[in-house]
Image (cartoon, coloured by chain):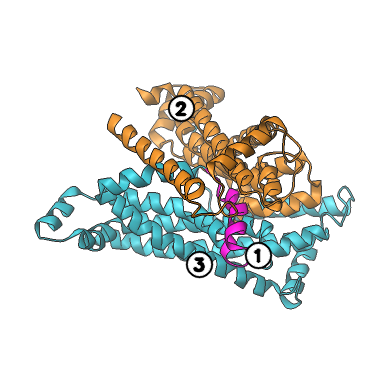
Chain colours: A cyan, B orange
Amino acid sequence: MNFSDRNLGRREVAGFAAVGVIAFLAIWYAAVWSGVTPRKFLPTPLEVLSELYRLSVEPFVGYTLLEHLVSSFKRFFYGFSLAVTIATPLGLLMAISKPVRVVVSPIFESIRFVAPIAWVPFAALWFGTGIGGPLLVIFMGAFPPMLINSFRGALYVDRKYLEAAQMLGAGPVRQMTEVLLPAAAPSIVAGLRISAGLGWQSLVGAELIVASSGVGYMMVKGQAGIQTATVMSGMIAIGLVGLIIDFSLRQLERRMGRYKETY
Amino acid sequence: MFLRTLYSGSVLILLVLAWFALTQWTGVISGARFPSPKETIDALRIIFLDGYSNGRLHEHVLQSVLLVTMGFAVSSAFGVVTGILMGANKKVEAVINPIFSLLRPIPPLAWIPLAIVWLGLENSAKILVIFVAAYVPCVINTFAGIRSLEVPQREAAAMLGLSQPVYYLEVLIPAALPMIFTGLRLSLQASWTTLVASELVGAMRGLGSILNQASQDILPPMILVGMVSVALCGWIMTQGLGFIERRAMPWRSL
């Protein structure tokens, strides 16, 4: 028996990929045309694409798709930025100061197990359904990975750098900004990616429940009217924006990789 | 270790005291914003004894936990098998990978409206959503785990004349097990979040429906009860999986 699996050539990979995608589309079309699934519940891929186009030119529940996306992205951006600005320094602080760690960890550990989405009712009660409510939910989704990565990154920084900084008379603030932050940067950037992913996902959840605009809201309205194509267009749009966010952060991460080698 | 527990314990006790002080004793935070301990205990009593949102607390817990367990079990079984197939065979990988990359960026929560259109507010809709949420992390991590087996190990297995089933059961899968469990843990978390979300969007019963109902009735104490139950159940299930993980890989704790 030979268990080594030979590598496929580029053309073979493309061929198999085509088989996969074609099979996927074929099953989809077969399901629609054979009438196994009613058309109302499963439109063809082309119908979904044309709906996607229609949504981006004609307003649906008040806004076009792009406007929904912009309002979703704004919420995401505020919540995510807030989480990053609070969690990163807090993580660094936890790494150098034992009292801070002792106070923050038990609180953090007990809150972390609340699924971000479970904050929705309080979010709506405290901050309403405009921008504040969804923002809290995104914050709750994006905060934990950011804090963990910033803390871990700073914790594993070689003690001798910190000791050298202390000996040279750097105070806690300078130790944080000039030693810990650059040394923990790769881990922090990795945290950005995880936390953006979770934040984007929490945003969608929040918008399904508490919002009066945004892609999630658009999907809920589509769902209420049993407009499957609209719902699917929303899914595609969400997926695309998520990909773009992840892609940009990955570029940042790659630069960090180079930076790490020269550090 | 002991000191740390002591510190954490005292921080949490201080926190509870602050909660009493801010809500019940001084009223700095009004009950309409955040419930006082007394209100919370009352809410707990109501939901325990009389029920709230179509059921008593244990019925809600049972409903949610059973659904997650079912969806997670089915999905992770499929996910792990897909991951093994993709990892062990590059052709399978080449066929499945593009479809997977197309569907993967869609967050599981975004499937909720589609599940409702297709299956309504029934349990089956929840299971579909949990399936989607749990499948992806299982596949990715199992795949990575299988690929982590290095060439010399494969060659050694071949040289020792292992048959295909023995190779899978005694070499490939044990080697991938740590990664598989990483995937399972992520899957379980994703399933739980997704279930709570889909119950919040619409359900007859379940922990999410408590949250939804309490939010509509503007009952902060009941919201808090719901949140704490969600967190506790999530925590207990994670611990349970950790227990299974230690049992499944006794060699790791050596």
Q: Which residue is mark 2?
A: B158
- Residue B175 appears in view: yes
Q: CA distance from mark 2 to mark 3?
A: 55 Å
In the rendered image, the vertical position of residue B177 relative to residue A46, given as above or below: above
Residue A93 part of the magenta segment? no
Q: Secondary structure at mark 2?
A: helix
Chain letter for mark 1, please: A
Question: Residue B126, labelled with which disc?
Answer: none
User: Majority secondary structure of the magenta segment?
Assistant: helix
In the rendered image, the vertical position of residue A258 relative to residue B104, given as above or below: below
In the rendered image, the vertical position of residue A4 relative to residue A111, given as above or below: above
Q: Which residue is mark 1?
A: A237
**Label 1 crowd (10 A; few <14 / some 14-19 / many >=20):** some
- The quarter of the picture where the C terminus of chain A appears is bottom left
Q: Position of residue B230 (x, y in %)?
A: 59, 40
Q: Single out the mark in the foreground, 1 or 3.
A: 3
Give the residue at x 59% y 61%. A133
Nearest to the observer: residue A181 or residue B47: B47
Give the residue at x 53% y 31%. B236
Q: Which residue is mark 3?
A: A78
- Residue numbers of the magenta segment: A114-134
Q: What kind of residue is marked 2? A: Ala
Chain letter for mark 3, please: A
